[in-house]
Amino acid sequence: MFDQLSDRLRETLRRVRGQARLTEDNIATAMREVRIALLEADVALPVVKAFIAQVRERALGADVMQSVTPGQMVVKIVHEELVAIMGESNDVLKLTARPPAVVLVAGLQGAGKTTTVAKLAQWLKQREHKKILLATTDIYRPAAIDQLKTLADMIDVDFFPASTDQDPVTIARNAIDHARRSGIDVVLMDSAGRLHVDARMMTEIRAVHAAVDPVETLFVVDSMTGQDAVNSATAFDEALPLTGIILTKTDGDARGGAALSIRHVTGKPIKFLGTGEKLNALEAFHPDRVASRILGMGDVLTLVEEVQQKVDKGKAEKLAKKIAKGKRFDLDDFREQIMQMEKMGGIASLVEKLPGMSGLPNHVMDQVDDRQIRRTVAIINSMTPGERANPTIIRGSRKRRIAAGSGTEVPEVNRLLKQFTQMQKMMKKMRKGGGMANLLAGMKGRRPGLPY
């Protein structure tokens, strides 16, 4: 997300930082470039105008012009103004009502609403330890009820059954009654998607809203639709008292205009970002962290939270003890580390959150391909237990068999074995003393498992 905008802003601000002193002329030039970058990112024009005006006013202030490092001060101002237009701070779900707290989820058809409901259920279950009930009033879309039931089973939360011949308001009321009797903490109520703001459908969802009196009414919108996302959120807010917005498909949105526009235009906070297809690909929206990512400063706090939530601590401790006892790091261990990385969103997601990684050369960034993770796992899976434990026995005929079994080529098997040997040496350096210092020295600027 924000790839195009990030590149343009970072280049513009790099030139500003390089100025020994700032003048009205070079500030004006920089602001023109920032304006173009924002418009190309499909940010709403009123938002662009307000942002540029505020940055220009502050950049020409005495505290910046007389600063020892005026360029750095401008970067700080841009960061702060990005945070301001996106909402200052994370707006958490307000679930303190008497149980069950009801969250009504609305949105246009095709925005990923039903999957987002399941993602939100898993997020609340894992992070907040809530007992969740999923229910849907979508009696129109074929198999909508079955889809939500399947998702509920996948994440092991309760589901309220319904049928297409029932009235949506009746379904909603019955689901709330069931939740009260069952000790449910939160009811996530899915609703029928709409192709556009249809009067009849809006009347229906207003009736559902009145029947369940939700503590949160969330609007799910596809971030890739840009200005249409802002327009549809505005239209829904006129019909329903929205309390927040969830942006989906942000992993496929290189512009990010919706994220930068929607709070300023609608006044409604973005509460979550959908960052992928998997059911754990949902993250709370923190404007300050997102602004840092846009400017290439990384997002260490989110990275730490993901490690805490997604990394299997038991397996990590087991590997640490194994290495400490002097046992060999083998290909089973290597595969486990790769799979843990994939749980955290893959290499691309990790790189985005690490400070300074935006400065990596293009030829390095081009090789940040999460598909390679799956190919690597396939190669290791095609080996015998003996080969994974002792890779030195893997030679000609074995390599050909492994390549055929994994749908790859022998050179890819060779490359994996070379990468694994490098990783083994790094682990050995850590075991012998010096810990992370020796590990970094052994890497010589490379990232683990990658041949550069």
Image (spheres, helix red, strand yellow):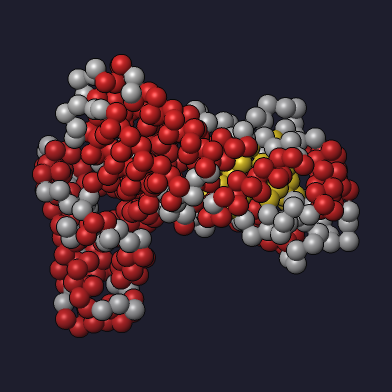
Query: What percent of the width, then of the height, locates residue 331?
Result: 26, 61
Side (left or right) of 3 relative to 396: right
In percent of width and height, residue 12 lies at 29, 41
Looking at the picture, tell me which residue is in the foreground, 322 or 421.
421
Residue 170 location, x and y as percent? 88, 48
Q: Position of residue 342 (x, y in %)?
A: 39, 55
Q: Residue at x 64, y 47 (%)?
A: 231
**In the rendered image, which quarter is residue 398 located in?**
bottom left
Q: Quadrant of the C terminus?
A: bottom left
| 132 to 395, vertically: above or below | above
Q: How many marks?
A: 0
Specify the quadrant of the image occupied by residue 143: bottom right
> Which residue is at 79% across, 62% downward?
140
Comparing 200 with 162, the one in front is 200
At a point 21% along the width and 24% down the height, the residue shown is 69
Q: Is residue 267 above or below residue 366?
A: above
Q: Is 15 left or right of 193, judged from the image as shown?
A: left
The correct choice, above or below, for 331 with respect to 399 in the image is above
Q: Nearer the viewer, residue 210 or 361?
A: 361
**Depth order, front residue of 360/62:** 62
Q: Is residue 119 left or right of residue 147?
A: left
Q: Residue furthest front?
A: 25
Q: Residue at x 56, y 55 (%)?
A: 225
Report which quarter residue 182 is drawn in.
Answer: top right
Residue 198 makes an appearance in the image: yes
Is residue 354 in sight in this rendering? no
